[in-house]
Amino acid sequence: MNGHSFLLVNYVPGSSLIHRAPLSLKFAAVLGCGLASFLVVDWAVAAAVLVLLCALFLLSGAGPYRLVRSVRPILPVLLAIGLFQWWQLGGPVAVRIVLNVLVCVVAASLLTATTPIQRLLDGVVSLARPLTRFGADPERFALTIAIMLRSIPFIVGAYSDVRDSARARGLERNPRALILPVFITTVAYARQTGDALAARGLGEPDDGKDSNGG
């Protein structure tokens, strides 16, 4: 399927300084970029941060092609947002908003490109562990993120395949020809995922097992 590179970049093995950096530092950097998108009011600062992140991405060895693929899917949305904000608030504000979104996307892509997915999920479990006192389950939380990271590219790829098929039959303007096949494919994928989790004893509440057992 097409579209499997949706937004976030898959892990690229390497030994760069960024690969070896502590996961906590990478998490903090991504969080800082997200907070900065609300705090930075100067488009020049946002541009400088974006250039720095792009340079770090290239220095990590992930390559320019992966960098372009990580931002390409959102470019039409950013264009629409930029034009609307330009009309409402002016050019500098519009540029700042678009740049801040790109900063967040590149920062997240840099994290996933330099961190194996299992290490990333282990880090999520560690971060969520203090929430166990409130009834949270860090393992299920990490499992949810893993399913999300796998499902989003699948759904995007399904839509891309259906769109190409509809275009080949001259039905690209027919919403039913686009939405219905994607819906059916997504439901089937969700059921397969649920069956796989159930087969491993996951995804079912513990109290349900207790009630069945007596």
Image: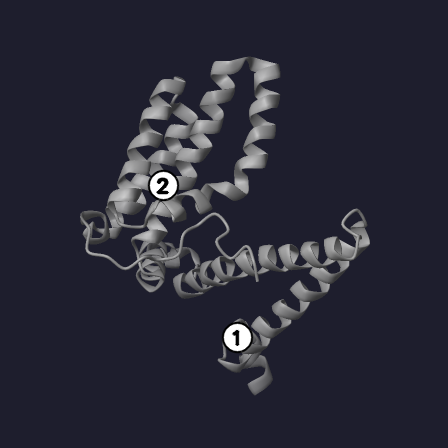
Label 2 element class: helix
Give the quarter of the image for residue 137.
bottom left
Q: Residue at x 58, y 80 (%)?
A: 211
Q: Amino acid at mark 2?
A: Ala
The x, y position of residue 107, in whole percent, is: 36, 41
Check the image and report above or below for 119 versus 70: below
Q: Which residue is mark 1?
A: 197
The residue lying furthest to the top in this view is: 90
The x, y position of residue 21, in whole percent, is: 20, 49
CA gap, disc 1 and disc 2:
31 Å
Check the image and report above or below for 81 versus 74: above
Quarter occupied by the C terminus: bottom right
Label 1 element class: helix
Q: Are marks 1 and 2 in contact (CB under 8 Å)?
A: no
Q: Residue at x 50, y 63 (%)?
A: 147
Crowding near pointer 2: few (<14 within 10 Å), some, many (20+)?
Answer: many
The x, y position of residue 95, in whole percent, is: 48, 21
Give the quarter of the image for residue 187.
bottom right
Q: Kindly tell me whether residue 179 is visible in this rendering.
A: no
Q: Kindly tell me whether residue 60 is visible in this rendering.
A: yes
The x, y position of residue 112, in whole percent, is: 36, 52
Q: Amino acid at mark 1?
A: Leu
189 lies left or right of 170: left
Most foreground residue, 10 or 198: 10
Q: Which residue is mark 2?
A: 107
